[in-house]
Image (tube, rainbow, N blue to C red):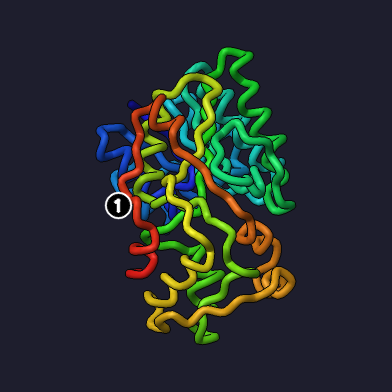
Amino acid sequence: MRVFLTGGSGYIGKATVSALVRHGHTVEALARNDRAAESVSALGATPVPGGLGDLGVLNAAAARAEAVVHLAQATTGDEDLAAATAMQDGIGSSTYVHTGGTWVYGDTQGVVDESAPWNPPSLVAWRERVEDAVLQRTQQGGRPVLVQPGLLYGGENRLIDLFYTNPGKEAGAMPYIGDGENRWALVHIDDLAELYVAALKAEPGAVYVGVGGVNPTAKDCALALSRAAGIEGKVASISLEQAREQMGPVADAFALDQQFTPARAQAELGWSPTHTDPLAVLACR
């Protein structure tokens, strides 16, 4: 299948391009500069020069493809919706896979699935308008699919490194927010890449949380990260107010208590996470 992909040189993108190529798909990937072009070329994709604001480029690339996977992170909801609209216009009745995230569900009050109500922190509140518009394309004969990744780990884990590992090393203790008993819905980057490949065959309007089904506490994650950082067992609680000062708005997302099941993707797509011990992986980074 010919697949056009945005965000191919990013954390999720590199893994997904590699998975698509491994499964025999031909990939064109948006590349905003020479460095990005070199990165996606090395993975086996053909670079398409341009950025998310180049709507004509997005539309034309989508029109050439048999499926689109949108991974690039937009700076605003308006930018994301405009890009999605251009690509959905181009792909027509073929599969368009859009990226969301599990943080939109807020605290889950136990283990839930994609039917849970939304209660997003302000950081991701803009997603609802975009994702509603994307999924409404089913009414016009489109084939939209929504993938909502959990908190990623494995490989070049920039988010956890930026807000936990690097500050923890500097402070001599890995932070966690509050009592650290809130749970993180983690997913390994390689498992998530396989979910994007599987989503190419999903039914129109399908929504899948991309999670590993193992939801350790934030404190247990901090302990694992402390071992990987060489500060064995040294962790420190910080208040939500302190976290907001140090991390910004993402602190409210890290403080969420979330547990999800990947059962829908397993049943409908045959996708099963293979990485089921995130703490071991975090401890060995």
In this view, 94 is above or below 218: above
Classify mark 1: helix, strand or loop.
Answer: helix
Residue 11: % across, % down: 44, 55
Position of 226 with respect to 52 (left or right) is: left
Residue 5: % across, % down: 45, 38
Q: Quadrant of the C terminus?
A: bottom left
Task: Residue at 61% x, 37% y: name it.
Answer: 83
Residue annotated with mark 1: 42
Q: 75 and 256: which one is in front?
A: 256
Q: 14 and 223: which one is in front?
A: 223
Task: Residue at 25% x, 33% y: name it.
Answer: 24
Q: Which image quarter: residue 53?
A: top right
In this view, 210 is above or below 160: above
Task: Residue at 54% x, 85% y: name it.
Answer: 171
Q: Which image quarter: residue 55?
A: top right
Inspect this view and state whether residue 49 appears: no
> What amino acid is found at the position of numbered circle 1 in the picture?
Ala
